[in-house]
Amino acid sequence: MAPSPLANNHILRTREHEESKSAAAHHVPGELEKLAVRGRRLARLCRGCHRSPSPLGIAATADGAGSRILHAASSRSDAELSARGVGNGDDQAVSGGVSESPCLRIALVGAGGFGTYTCELIDRQPEIELVGVADTDAGKAQRLGNDRGVPFWTEHRALLDECDCDAVAIVTTHSTHRDIAVDAAAAGRHIFCEKTMAITVADCHDMVEAADTHGVKLMVGHKRRFRPASAAIRRALGTDGLGRPLAVNVRGFFGRRITGFWRERSLCGGLLYWAGVHDVDTLRYLFGEVASVYAVLGPKARPEVSDQEDAISVALTFQSGMVGSLQVSTFYPMATYQTAFGFDIVCERGGVSYNPHDLTITTHLEDQPPGVVRLEHNSPDGAYDREWSSFAAWVLRDEAPVLTGQDGLRCVEILQAAYLSAATGTRVDLPLDRNERRPFDDLS
């Protein structure tokens, strides 16, 4: 396989230190922050993007890796560290016997709670380095930037102009994904967009077309595809043992706590967009494309908490002819992680029962007693880590992705069709028109 253009053109280049273009929006960490992040980056040289240990004695030793790393960082001048590519955040220019291998330099847009968690996920990836943060909330941007030892911005376009990154991770409200992704693509950055991709298929098409036009990769974060249970169910459905799938029933009954932008329809799209999106993507992953959608919204039981419905019921017909039902609610006081969601699949000769901590596959054959296979598994079982590893492998080595922007688009298409059906009282056939924005015209 030919080397990735990114490896040749972006990743292994030596970056000159960039001066701040806007003191109000771009912050370079102070000396103590720099020292701490140098230690982390030197540690990464030994375990991550650069596999070979340095001859300068900064690899892990009996007297403790952390103390040796900090000592190595503090005993060298900024000029020396900069020459080695440490002081300015560029680990790719390191010389002195350290082997070079591609490392994905990524900037984060969105410094909220999940943005902070995303930084932890990136930390666990040996092939990815966080190099910048942006958030419209200056306080959040500054706190996360200082905590991670990277520059921060208060506007994503400034980050794209000034930050030497190869890709961006979009972890913001659903309503903002389209503009950030289109701008990132135009700037030549690869894109990891956290679910839900957008609120309308029109916005999703804009994102996919921008990525295609500018030759960048676009992945949407549907982590359940990376769970071992999802792969096990898909394998079981792909054999002759269970027979043809006939029906599936999915439940997503969550507790009464709704936080953040999920409270506002204009920011998230509706209950199904944040509480049912994983289920919808999983259904596509297991059963293929949906042909039609019919949905009914439940009442708004807590208008003082959220401007959305507190329950929704969706009927799905797949192109294969099988049928499905999905019920989602955020008014289930007995909800726990073990009971909040799951599904049951009916097949010609058996079935599948699933929840986050229990997976049972039962087969029924005419001439044999029932066969039961039960797999115990933990959740989230490393799904986020595999998701990010897959993104890095796609960008760095052009390995086939588990999902792409098209998967995110098709998922949003089903979500939007459900709300269009509820608004019109009719069944909605798929695919939707490329420019369809109903019933979210007022959010445009």
Image: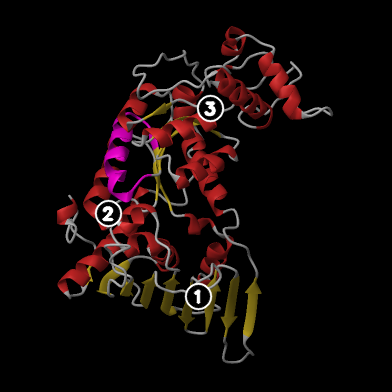
Using the rendered image of the protein, determine whether residue 208 is visible from the camera's viewpoint. Answer: no
Element under label 3?
loop
Q: As shown in the figure, which amino acid type bears the numbered disc 1?
A: Met
Q: In this view, does 41 lie to the left or right of 155?
A: right
Could you tell me what secondary structure mostly forms the magenta stretch?
helix
Q: Determine if the magenta segment contains residue 275.
A: no
Q: Which residue lies furthest to the front in this view?
A: 304
Q: In this view, does 73 lie to the left or right of 398?
A: right
Element under label 1?
loop
- Residue 59: horizontal and vertical position, in percent? 74, 25
Q: Mark 1 points at which residue?
A: 334
Inter-mark Cα distance, 1 to 2 = 30 Å
Inter-mark Cα distance, 3 to 2 = 33 Å
Foreground label between 1 and 2: 1
Up/down of 66 relative to 438, above or below: above
The disc, 3 or 2, on the residue closer to the chain's N-terminal end is 3
Using the rendered image of the protein, determine whether residue 387 is visible from the camera's viewpoint. Answer: yes
